[in-house]
Image (cartoon, rainbow, N blue to C red):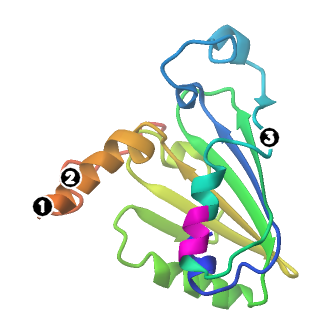
Amino acid sequence: LLPLAANGLLNNSIHVNATTGSTGAGVQPSATSHHPWRIGNMSHYKAFEHQHMGEIIQSLGQLQNGFDKEVLFIPNRGDFTRGIFATLYTKVSKSFDEVTALYKNYYSNEPFVRVTIDSIHLKLAVQTNKCFISLEQKGDYLLITSVIDNLVKGASGQAIQNMNLMFGLEETTGLQLKATGF
């Protein structure tokens, strides 16, 4: 959503559905993080009131002054260990070509972000520091799909990337990881 917010294009409600693997449940074991419960199962939790809602709205507001649109966030527990598969949709007033160009431009200097119009899947990102973003549009609706590995890009890899920047190292040092799903 950041490229849209940076260009003042978030003018409608936003619908987010994100499914996380069991490692996204934190370090404290619970009934819903136990693999026998998760295998062949899926459920949602903290619908519309997830603890990260404040951060999401704050980040969008920092990029788009006066942002006050409804963000409907449904987090899900998935039947996999690592990763986050997120789908978001909202109405946009730009053509698909304009939106695609806007996204590619916004992330052009980000070595770990890949923007595509092709379909994506979780195994592209697992065990890497990459974030894949796929765009589709039907009429006024823009569908944004993203995949990351929550343990690498979502945690340790992001920390290393930040450290590299802080110490003046090449941003990608130690992070040229290959997905092991293939």
Residue type at mark 2 is Met
Q: Find out whether the residues at labels 2 and 3 contact each other: C-beta distance under 8 Å.
A: no
Type of residue at label 1?
Leu
Residue shown at 45%/75% (left/top)? 107
Q: Is residue 145 left or right of residue 3?
A: right
Q: CA distance from mark 3 to mark 1?
A: 40 Å
Q: Local crowd at mark 3 within 10 Å, few (<14), some, or many (≥20)?
A: few
Q: Say which residue appears at 18% left-offset and 56% top-offset.
A: 164
Tag shown at residue 163 = 2
Q: Earlier in the sequence, mark 2 or mark 3?
A: 3
Instruction: Using the image, tell me which numbered label, if any, was put on residue 47.
Output: 3
Q: Position of residue 71 (x, y in %)?
A: 76, 60
Q: Which mark is in front, 3 or 1?
A: 3
Q: Which SS does the magenta portion mostly show?
A: helix
Q: Earlier in the sequence, mark 3 or mark 1?
A: 3
The local crowd at label 1, few if under 14, some if 14 to 19, many if 20 or more residues have their Cα within 10 Å, is few
First-in-chain label (2 vs 1)? 2
Q: Which residue is mark 1?
A: 169
57 or 5, nearer to the observer? 57
Q: Which quadrant holds the N terminus?
A: bottom right
Residues rendered magenta in the picture: 58-62
